[in-house]
């Protein structure tokens, strides 16, 4: 089975307090679903038209767990706390074996 990854790029933070509230709820929800943060922060270097935006990568033991984690009640609470606090692009991708 392939690992699964959430790859999130933060284009803009509209409400730092909402983002902080999201982070407080999201971290334990992601950990409970088997996720492990492997990247958190802005790009140090950019190439090929990239932006120095905040990027977060979370690794899950399987792709299926990555998909299921997004739909948990605890993560939905984190998303509700975030609301319009940030403009993000979140992708769930399958790792190579």
Image (cartoon, rainbow, N blue to C red):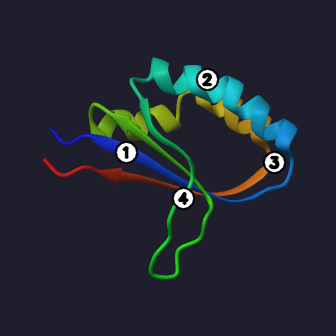
Disc 3 marks which residue? 85
Task: Determine which residue is flagged by label 1.
Answer: 5
User: Could you tell me which residue is drawn at 60 percent across and 30 percent down?
Assistant: 75
Cα separation, mark 1 vs mark 2, equals 18 Å
* Real-space CA distance between mark 3 and mark 4, rounded to the nearest whole angstrom: 20 Å
- Disc 3 on helix, strand or loop? loop
- Is residue 11 placed above or below 18 in the rendered structure? below
**Marks 3/1: CA–CA distance:** 23 Å
Specify whether 84 is left or right of 49. Answer: right
**Distance from the alpha carbon under mark 4 to that under mark 2:** 28 Å
Of circles 4 and 2, which is in front? 4
Which of these two is toward me, 31 or 42?
Answer: 42
The answer to whether residue 60 is seen in the rendering is yes
Q: Give how far apart the Cα atoms at labels 4 and 1 are.
A: 18 Å
Q: Earlier in the sequence, mark 4 or mark 1?
A: 1
Residue tagged 2: 74
Observer-nearest of 10 and 89: 10
Q: Position of residue 49 (x, y in %)?
A: 52, 81
Q: Earlier in the sequence, mark 3 or mark 4?
A: 4
Label 3 Cα crowd, 10 Å radius (few <14 / some 14-19 / many 20+): many
* CB within 8 Å, label 3 to label 4: no
Question: Taking 75 as reference, is 12 left or right?
Answer: right
Name the mark nearer the viewer: 1 or 2. Answer: 1
| Earlier-in-chain disc, 4 versus 2 | 4
* Residue at mark 4: 43
Numbered-mark total: 4
Q: In this rendering, does residue 73 appear at all?
A: no
């Amino acid at each position: 089975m392939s690992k699964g990854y959430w790859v999130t790029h933060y284009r803009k933070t509209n409400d730092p307090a909402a983002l902080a509230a999201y982070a407080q709820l999201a971290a334990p929800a992601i950990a409970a679903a088997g996720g492990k943060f492997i990247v958190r922060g802005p790009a140090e270097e950019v190439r090929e038209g990239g932006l120095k935006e905040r990027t977060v990568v979370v690794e899950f033991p399987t792709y299926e767990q990555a998909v299921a984690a997004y739909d948990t009640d605890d993560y939905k609470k984190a998303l509700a706390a975030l609301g319009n606090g940030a403009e993000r692009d979140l992708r769930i991708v399958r790792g190579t074996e």
